[in-house]
Image (cartoon, rainbow, N blue to C red):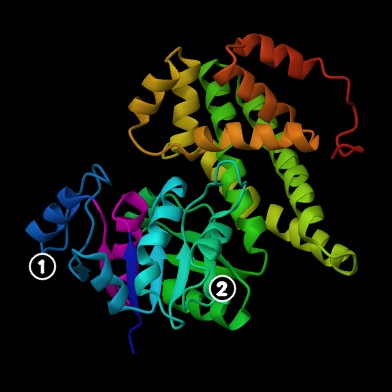
């Protein structure tokens, strides 16, 4: 029996997953971009459709059912995939609150963090839906090296789904599974979400290094040291939420998260793929474009740009050692020259790769 799935959001990732999941499931798609729906409906029944959110890629939407109202999309399925940028997750959760029930499962696909509160998307969803019939243990998050363009093209992709309930995670893996998409389960939902957010920041730095012709050595070093900064940030978060008796378990979860698909896997794809918005944004900045011009040139949401100021502020407040993040913030928002930032990073006095600050 086919699973009924509603995707909320018809941007690039929502459309790519809609095409992929519609092969084995009954798929309903809702979003705010009417033009995208017009393009899908105009080619209904055809196996190759091109939409603005996936430029240049022919996608099979023949089995996708378009829903024009949010309430109807929610009523059609108990499984809802929230495929909107991180800054829109809270408002979308508020919109669905009147229609949500205890039977619904929500999967966040966004990779960002909420300004001021430093909450992950699952935390935002849980807090926004408090007081409704929704059950918090039915929240999950999807992440990994999962560029929408390659999913839409049917290229082999591995992802990871994190949630509190093992049985739910295993069920979601079956729903997401296709010939070209395989998913794994994970229990560290907050760590998975933080990894998906932090790697965007490091990818901007790698993009700048590429534009400045610093070489692959420098780009690989930035990505690797960036992974260590991600670990420090996860350490700080786990210390806030972990009971003493669970410290060893939390450390193992962090290791699994960092060195899994949602950590190093997503980091590599975002730092080095031509599809990476964050890497391209950094590249354009490195070529001399202003922040506004670089954002416009990318033409899609650059999550790392919005996350950078939030993470840099939290790192300073909590004394988390994140020199790449701090330097990138100074370059983007304080006018520091890239060459000076690089010189300062190269002249730092720490010599132990895995020392006390790691």
Q: Is residue 22 left or right of residue 84?
A: left
Q: Name which quarter of the figure residue 348 lies in.
A: top right
Image coordinates for residue 284, horizontal then vertical, percent:
44, 21
Residue position marked by numbered label 2 in the rendering: 136
Query: Does 77 sit above or below residue 53?
Result: below
Query: Does 117 sit above or below residue 245?
Result: above
Residue 43 makes an appearance in the image = no
* Residue drawn at (70%, 52%) of the image: 258
Q: Is residue 13 magenta?
A: yes
Q: 225 and 155: which one is in front?
A: 225
Are circles 2 and 1 on residues that touch, CB within 8 Å?
Answer: no
Q: Is residue 18 magenta?
A: yes
* Residue drawn at (43%, 78%) of the image: 104
Image coordinates for residue 165, horizontal then vertical, percent:
61, 78
Q: Is residue 247 left or right of residue 28?
A: right
Q: Is residue 127 left or right of residue 4?
A: right
Question: Mark 2: which secondary structure?
Answer: helix
Please report the bounds of the magenta region as a residue range.
9-32
Query: Does 221 sit above or below residue 16?
Result: above
Q: Which mark is residue 45?
A: 1
Q: Name which quarter of the figure residue 322 lies in.
A: top right
Find the residue positioned furthest to the left: 42
* Residue drawn at (47%, 79%) of the image: 133
Q: Which mark is residue 207?
A: none
Quarter of the figure that contains the N terminus: bottom left
């Amino acid at each position: 029996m086919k699973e009924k799935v509603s995707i909320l959001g018809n941007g690039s990732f929502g459309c790519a997953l809609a095409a992929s999941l519609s092969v084995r499931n009954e798929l309903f798609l809702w979003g705010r971009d009417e033009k995208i729906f017009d393009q899908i409906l105009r080619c209904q029944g055809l196996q190759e459709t091109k939409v603005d959110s996936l430029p240049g890629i022919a996608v099979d939407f023949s089995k996708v059912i378009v829903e024009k109202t949010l309430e109807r999309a929610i009523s059609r399925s108990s499984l809802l995939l929230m495929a909107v940028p991180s800054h829109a997750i809270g408002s979308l959760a508020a919109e669905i609150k009147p229609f949500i029930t205890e039977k619904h499962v929500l999967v966040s696909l966004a990779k960002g963090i909420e300004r001021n509160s430093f909450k992950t998307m699952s935390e935002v969803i849980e807090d926004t839906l408090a007081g409704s019939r929704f059950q918090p243990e039915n929240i999950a998050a999807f992440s990994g090296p999962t560029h929408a363009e390659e999913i839409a093209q049917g290229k082999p992709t591995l992802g990871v789904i994190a949630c509190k309930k093992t049985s739910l995670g295993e069920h979601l893996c079956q729903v997401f599974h296709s010939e070209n998409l395989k998913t794994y389960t994970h229990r560290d939902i907050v760590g998975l979400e933080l990894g998906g957010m932090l790697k965007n920041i490091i990818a901007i730095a790698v993009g700048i290094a590429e534009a400045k012709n610093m070489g692959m050595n420098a780009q690989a070093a930035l990505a690797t040291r960036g992974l260590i900064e991600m670990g420090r940030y996860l350490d700080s978060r786990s210390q806030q939420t972990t009971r003493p008796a669970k410290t060893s378990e939390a450390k193992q979860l962090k290791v699994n998260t960092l060195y899994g698909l949602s950590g190093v896997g997503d980091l590599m794809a975002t730092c080095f793929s031509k599809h990476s918005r964050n890497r391209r944004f950094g590249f354009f900045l490195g070529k001399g474009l202003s922040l506004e011009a670089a954002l416009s040139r990318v033409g899609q949401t650059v999550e790392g740009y919005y996350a950078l100021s939030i993470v840099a502020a939290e790192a300073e407040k909590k004394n988390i050692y994140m020199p790449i993040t701090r330097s990138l913030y100074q370059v983007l928002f304080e006018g520091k020259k890239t060459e000076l930032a690089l010189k300062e990073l190269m002249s730092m006095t720490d010599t132990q790769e895995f020392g006390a600050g790691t």
